[in-house]
Image (spheres, coloured by chain):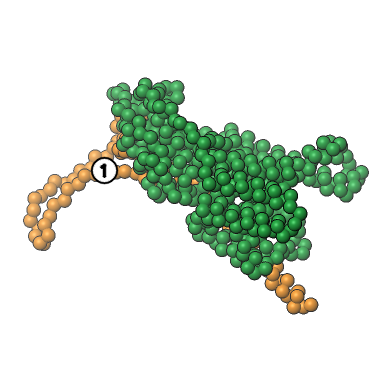
Amino acid sequence: MGKNLLFTPKEELSQRQRKMRRERMGILITALIIMTAWAVGYFANDTDTLESALMVLPGAAEVQTRGTYYIGLDQNGALVGYAAEGSGDGYGGPIRVMVGVDPAGELLSVMVIEQRETPGFYRLVNSNDYLDQFLNREISESFQVGSDIDGISGATLTSAGIASSVRESLQIIAREGLKDPLPPERTQIKFGLPEFFLIGLYAAGYLSGRFRNSKVKRRIRWGTLLTGMIVLGFIYTAPLTISQVIAFLSGYWPDWQNNLYWYLLIGGMLLSTALDAKNSYCAYFCPFGAFQETLAQLTDAKLYRPRGWKDFLKWLPRVLTLGAIVIGLVLRQPGVVGYEPFATLFDLRGTGLEWALLILTIFASLIFYRPFCNFICPIDPTVDYIYAIRRWISEARKK
Amino acid sequence: MKAARNRNLGKTTIFGIFLFGSVLLIIIIIASDLAGKGDTSGYVHSTPALVTPIGFEETLSAAPTRDRGEGQGQGEGHGDGEGHNEGEELPTPTINLTTYPTEDDV
């Protein structure tokens, strides 16, 4: 029994049982660390929305709370406008905004009061004067990215998340403050080429394991690798990242109708790992893995592990991943701790440091087989952890 | 034998540079992102926001803006472009400073 294994004295255990015990202790300690980080982050972070409400109502001397919205009054007690908070799904989690509207229904101010985006994405929003588009417009306008709001190339989810949160604020103000409700938003399920390709790639990865002919298997694998690199990488820049895993753990689950890709990506990885014990994503279509493997193919690079480094190389990515997860959960900022150079390669966007990391990885990929995947990437330790839990459960079920 | 050992040593050195270089870069990337996250909020408003905290009627302060702000100003200039020093004598400008309440006022 698993319980016996954890509490039995070390001397009475075989080598294999000791290894299993170490693994199970590792699972429990990791789970405890993650849960503690989650709890610390959950109870520690709060934003003073009253102050934000005052800021989005220019000329207001005070704001008063009225249930879900605020009213701003000037020094003489005259109404200056209404303010309300809204929330929309960004890349790293919910984006909260405070919006101020004057009594005639004209938008006065927009303030992002909380966001969890990758700093690179958010800088794009700020540097493109994206928020300016919302000002001095009627509350009844649609505020849809691609319609009357221009999105930001390279920060599509962030710009859509802000627009969505502004719309939510305006719904509240119109309904509660102006007493003139806006028509409810129509929710459409967003299903396009990225979702289509993702399902196809997962299916190909799953089915390829059923073929016995290694030549066919190899061809399918190269097909999925190149498709993943071109479609999920260079065209849509939508690989799986540690930020998405942290957002998932934080409970920042976006609405499924607009973020089906997110659910397919994370759900597919979890399901294929937990149920089938196969990580199709990394092996078959990870865009960055495919890029490294293509480079390795050019120079016939092989997997390399220096002698005596085995334990260090096993623990390094685990420590990096756990560190990133803990920081992300404590700060409730999944976007800040993402360190993969994916966007730098596929979107040609990044800081000097991110470019340096990418160049180092490209150089190493010409000499060693998938060095980032094998020794740095946070997805592999995440998958290993799921495998370990799966092993524990299946052994407990056998007994 | 010696050549093979040297080749391996060279490979290990390159591997070490990649590994430790990457880890160092990752730590700096995360640290700089964490340091910069306080500056990433956004705020825009259509008119200069003047906030008058309750109880301090004489205190006017522009609402803090982190990334962008707006400002309004007026000014006049006099003079000509031919090097003459003639012109209307302007009164000495006076600046009205906002008076902030002292502890006694409070």
Q: Give the structural element (helix, strand or loop) at label 1.
A: loop
Which chain, by letter, is orange?
Answer: B
Against A16, is B97 above or below?
A: above
Q: Residue B28, how many percent across, how many down?
A: 56, 55
Q: Position of residue A373 (x, y in %)?
A: 65, 56
- Residue B63 in sight from this viewpoint: no
Quarter of the image where the N terminus of chain A is located: top right
Which residue lies under the disc numbered 1? B72
What colour is chain A? green
Camera-nearest residue between A394 and A220:
A220
Question: x, y percentage for residue A216?
Answer: 70, 57
Q: Residues within 10 Å of mark 1 (few under 14, many from 20)?
A: few
Residue drawn 12% across the image and 55% down it: B79
**Placement of A172 over or under B92, stated as above or below:** above
Residue drawn 13% across the image and 46% down it = B91
Q: Amino acid at mark 1?
A: Gln
Please state the chain letter of the residue tagged with numbered disc 1 in the rendered image. Answer: B
Report the residue at 73% width, 41% height from top.
A275
